[in-house]
Image: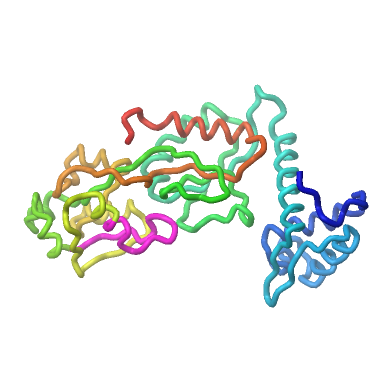
Amino acid sequence: MNKLSGAAAVKLNGSHLGGLHVFLVAARHLSFSQAADELCLTASAVSHRISRLEAELRLKLFHRLPRKVSLTEDGERLFSVMQRTMDELSEAIHERSDAEIAGQLTLYVRPSIAQCWLVPRIAEFTSRYPDIQLDIRVGNESIDHRTRKIDLVLCYSDGNHPGLSTVRLMGERIAPVCSPQYAEAHQLTGNPDQLTTCTALHDIAAWDNAAFDAEWRLWGQSTEHPLQLPKRFLTFDRSDLCTLAALNHAGVAIGREQLIKERVLQGDLILPFGGFVSTPNYGYYLVHPTHEQTPRRLQVLVEWLANCVDATTP
């Protein structure tokens, strides 16, 4: 186990607890001013308490740079230890026995998968685990687990999440979709060359740092059809809004099978250029910080989500 380099002769006592709490908040935000807002202190008071803690521990915890701070190697180690300790304390408080799975969980979900897949199923989870207080947040931003207390993220991605625990929940297949009326008006069925006469509907937030036409290009790479996108397009930051626009004859969208298969079965949407194609690596992933011992309530949520996936899912 790595030891903090200068603290071998220092014994922690109660007088250090206040300073350690200030350190934990400042390390989480990597900002003395944001820590000050959370702690109801001034930024100078935060800086003073950190300096006093560093002197008492004989450690340099922060690099102080113009308008920002960063953790030193010792600071990173101390922060990691304190985060693990907080997780263990949370477990001791919330999980009183294996038979009683309780406590709060914050689940961050991309909006489209939340609306089209997760929320219609969530009543079963709350019925099975009534003592878990599930807080579902939706959005497209990239989550920094250091600065936001998010227990689990359900996202659409290529599965590359360095430094985090990642579980592939289900794969995804995609295809251009539109309403039957739109396909007929533009003579699209079986004729991908006609795509240039249409309006393309783009999900510009398909995954973190995605290009505005990323899903169209992913489809083009997975099919023999040459990709020539029209100059007319509409952009959205949610896949389900692209689908809604396609349903209302606004253009052609890239449809994700997990989100639109019912609409296709009902005939509200058609696949003018053939069936869905697989997207290597891309799919829905569960992502969370790595724990030495994963909280039981988090385990049951991950297991429940996995059990929701149909056996025929790609």
Nearest the viewer among 18 and 58 is: 58
Count of marks, rendered view: 0
Apparent side of residue 80 relative to residue 14 in the rendered image (left or right): left
Q: Quadrant of the N terminus?
A: top right
Name the residue furthest bottom. 66
Q: Quadrant of residue 288?
A: top right
Residue 78: x, y in percent?
Answer: 76, 52
Name the residue furthest top. 99
Apparent side of residue 228 relative to residue 172 in the rendered image (left or right): left
Apparent side of residue 201 relative to residue 111 in the rendered image (left or right): left
Q: How is the image coloured?
A: rainbow
Q: Quadrant of residue 280?
A: top left
The residue drawn where x is 29% and y is 60% is 202
Q: Quadrant of residue 66?
A: bottom right
Q: Does residue 223 appear anywhere in the picture?
A: yes
Apparent side of residue 167 relative to residue 71 in the rendered image (left or right): left
- Residue 150 position (above or below residue 167): below
The residue drawn where x is 62% and y is 31% is 296
Residue bounds of the magenta highlight? 199-217
Residue 72: x, y in percent?
Answer: 73, 62
Q: Does residue 26 appear anywhere in the picture?
A: no
Residue 221: x, y in percent?
Answer: 26, 53
Q: Is residue 102 magenta?
A: no
Residue 223: x, y in percent?
Answer: 21, 50
Q: Quadrant of the C terminus?
A: top left
Q: Is residue 213 magenta?
A: yes
The residue drawn where x is 23% and y is 42% is 263
Nearest the viewer among 104 and 164 is: 164
The residue drawn where x is 79% and y is 59% is 22
